[in-house]
Image: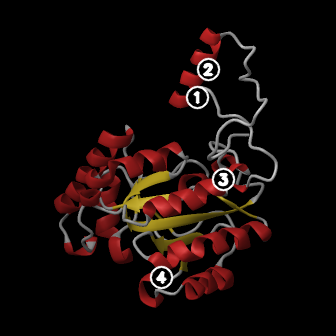
Amino acid sequence: MVPTGGGAPSGWWLGAAMPRALTLCVAMGLALGVIGSPPAAAGDDDGAVAAGVHRAAADCAEVKCVALTFDDGPSRYTERYLKILKRHGAVATFFVIGSQVSGRASTLVTMAAQGNEIASHTWSHPALTSLSGGQIRQQVERTARQVAKITGKRPSLLRPPYGSVNGRVLAALGEADVAAIMWDVDTRDWQSRSPSAVFGHIKRETHRGSIILMHDLHRASADALERIIHYLDKRGYTLVTVTDLLGGTVKPGKAYYSGRR
């Protein structure tokens, strides 16, 4: 089990008896992430969950899965979301705005390293129904290039801003090789700006296969996230990425509102 913080417990296997050369090699491996960190001491909450053991490995045909999704980032709150998710061994899908990515490249690196899914929310957040097919494809491509430049992977999912989609938009997204990801639980965090209201929507509306919409630029959802994860966990839900919720593959140009119920 890999702790999220703290040093090695006293008496751990990097003892004084280990030859100096091997000790240095192991220390370098720890720093570079090649070798896992030492096990957490009992009672250490920060080390209670293994980093790198992501719930995305779950088989959603066998267990109750839901996907937390966050739009409009990366923002000043995104690192806080990532720390909470990591602490609970949970993952989410982040729909990022391409024009905001370059200034927060390290955030995307952390996001991907923790097993979260990075998806597109277009380059500049326009209503896609107001654009031509060529303009839609440009919104997709610019964001894909920017994300791939940082993470090495192009997004295969896109959330249309405002949920604005029609047949023409879906056709253009198909040509751009991305699927449209909608939602079936709207926390309306942008409207209430209230952690309790955000939690209330999730408590009332979530079911197996839900895709839950939040925004990582609002503090309300950050304040509610810990409570949300505890609630979903106690009710037997497993938090996965959208791609895993949908069985590991998606069809470009298709709109998805939820996963397996």
Question: Dot 4: few (<14), some (14–19), or many (≥20) neighbours within 10 Å?
Answer: many
Secondary element at image label 3: loop
Instruction: Decide which of tag 4 and tag 1 comes sooner along the chain.
Output: 1
CB atoms of marks 4 and 1 within 8 Å: no
Q: Disc 4 to disc 1, how far (Cα)?
A: 39 Å
Report if residue 116 is visible in the image.
yes
Q: Answer left or right for 100 relative to 76.
A: left
**Which amino acid, by three-letter code, is at mark 3?**
Gly
Quarter holding the N terminus is top right
**What residue is drawn where x is 51% and y is 87%?**
194
List the residue tagged with mark 1: 30
List the residue tagged with mark 2: 26
**What residue is drawn where x is 62% and y is 26%?**
35
CB atoms of marks 3 and 1 within 8 Å: no
Instruction: Decide which of tag 3 and tag 1 comes sooner along the chain.
Output: 1
Secondary element at image label 4: helix
Secondary element at image label 1: helix
List the residue tagged with mark 4: 189
User: Is label 2 or label 4 in front?
Assistant: 2
Q: Quadrant of residue 153?
A: top left
**What residue is drawn where x is 67% and y is 85%?**
204
Measured along the vertical axis of the image, is residue 22 above or below residue 247?
Answer: above
Q: Which mark is residue 89?
A: 3
The foreground one among 207 and 47 is 47
CB atoms of marks 2 and 1 within 8 Å: yes
**Which amino acid, by three-letter code, is at mark 1?**
Leu
Colouring method of the image: secondary structure
